[in-house]
Image: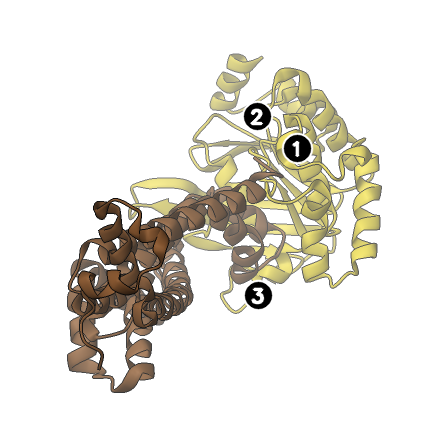
Chain colours: A brown, B yellow
Amino acid sequence: MMAVLTFAKWIVDAPGWILSLPEGLQRLIFQFYQVFIYENRWKFFTDGLATTFIVTIGALVIGVIIGMIVALIRSTHDSQSKKPNIVLRILNVICKIYVTVLRGTPLMVQLLIMGFVIMVPKGNFETMLCAVITLGINSGAYVAEIARSGIMSINAGQMEAGRSLGLNFAQTMWHIILPQALKNILPALGNELIALLKETSLVTVIALQDVTKAAQVIVSKAYTAVIPYISLALIYLVLVMILTKLLAILERRMRKNER
Amino acid sequence: MSDNVIIRTIDLKKHYKGDEIRALDGVSAEIRRGEVVVVIGPSGSGKSTFLRSLNLLELPTSGSIFFEDVDITDSKVNINLHRQKMGMVFQQFNLFPHMTVLKNLTLAPMKLLKKSKEEAEKKAMELLERVGLKDRAEAYPEQLSGGQKQRVAICRALCMNPDVMLFDEPTSALDPEMVGEVLDVMKSLAKEGMTMVVVTHEMGFAKDVADRVIFMCDGKIVEEGIPDDFFTNPKDERAKQFLKSIL
């Protein structure tokens, strides 16, 4: 274990051009050096970023799958003209409870319960799995409501037109309702993705080494908080801006043709 | 059942809120093959509900509907198969906005009749040519005028080679100058011998094209007959009232 690097120790070995700078700037450069370069600490950030990406994408996939299924069950149930059959009614109640519970409790609490009560993961892989599943289940509840509103926003005449041609309910949903609904909910889904990316920072409570944890580790090693945490904020900000841009491009593509 | 009856309804009832609202109150009617039947009546008379229950878009509370000698109200019947034989045209067109005109026309034949893309498109193009919209095949519905949309909607239904066509106020959402082009298509269909049930307010169409007129009021058929008799000499008091108010 190396001793803590102090400014006095660092300036002795510093390259000549730094010595000619005013002291304030020297100290700033020292801080950067200490946070990113010394002992290859930037690797904490890149490793953490990789974890953040994996958790975000994994949770997104799970969230969209769960959300779509729940939305289909809920809107199928609500669109029945006669009394829905018993299986559908039970499924509908389960979905309602799921959405209520997951949206009614804080994500932090859900992580604590999954991490220390239900899954109790050991090792890096299990912890990451726990984070992906928890965030995915959480996100699914929000996606479900977004997708349901998208399906409900499609004029009932579209379903009637599909059915009148002889298409069954599932075929009409798949070919006619869902493509239109998806286009309508894309902005909301984008927002959900951005929220999800930022919420992954909470996985530090189950000791997963994401990018937020990386910043915390560096703070504890370098005894300075300013540069690590500001850098952390900038990393999230840049990621969100890139995502926003990508979503805008996607939306424009989908709108090019119609309406 | 006689051969030439294609649709027969027996004592069809549609009630809402228990028995409070009776959209259909015992409708028994027959549609024969090749016949053009126009259903008219004041608003709220149940004529749209009647038409929409013929392909079970509206589930009747009681009564039966025989289509080609099968009781389609029987829950064991696969209604999707029978709907393929009943084309429907809506007041609001209900074209699929995310598909081109051509895709609108070929979706159902490809999925349900298992036609190849080429076959389905060939048939679609023939129909589009007939209604004068061949050059709009690659357009999206929103790029069309109302009259064009409705002509496309008629083609979409015809692509399934239906045995009967149901029209639910097909010209009511159109600007006046576009009504004619849609009625012309319907007239030529009638001339070719297509069985048609038409709910409409176009009395001119009823007089010229209909083989029979059904007048509905309060969820019941109160008078029916050939157009000449009905329009010149209605017997029911409500029919007289109705004709006086619109002519």
- The answer to which quarter of the image holds residue A119 is bottom left
Above or below, A142 against A160 in this view is below
Q: Which amino acid, by three-letter code, is at mark 2?
A: Ser
Q: Chain of mark 1?
A: B
Tag 3: Cα neighbours inside 10 Å, few (<14), some, or many (≥20)?
Answer: few
Above or below, B58 against B221 in this view is below
Quadrant where the image shows the C terminus of chain A? top right
Tag 1: Cα neighbours inside 10 Å, few (<14), some, or many (≥20)?
Answer: many
Give the CA distance from mark 1 to mark 3: 28 Å
Q: Which amino acid, by three-letter code, is at mark 3?
A: Asn
- Residue B147 point in image, percent of width and height: 67, 26
Name the element at disc 1.
Answer: helix
User: Viewer-nearest of labels 1 and 3?
Assistant: 1
Q: Chain of mark 3?
A: B
At a point 18% along the width and 65% down the height, the residue shown is A6
Residue B78, disc: 3
Q: Earlier in the sequence, mark 2 or mark 1?
A: 1
Give the CA distance from mark 2 to mark 1: 11 Å
Q: Earlier in the sequence, mark 2 or mark 3?
A: 3
Quadrant where the image shows the N terminus of chain A? bottom left
Q: Which amino acid, by three-letter code, is at mark 1?
A: Gln
B53 or A123: which is nearer to us? A123
Task: Name the residue tied to disc 2.
Answer: B172
Mark 2 touching mark 1, by CB under 8 A?
A: no
- Residue B36 point in image, percent of width and height: 70, 37
Looking at the image, can residue A101 be seen? no
Name the element at disc 2.
Answer: loop
Task: Name the residue tied to disc 1.
Answer: B150
- Residue B182 point in image, percent of width and height: 70, 28
User: Viewer-nearest of labels 2 and 1?
Assistant: 1
At a point 58% along the width and 37% down the height, the residue shown is B90
Q: Are marks 1 and 3 on the same chain?
A: yes
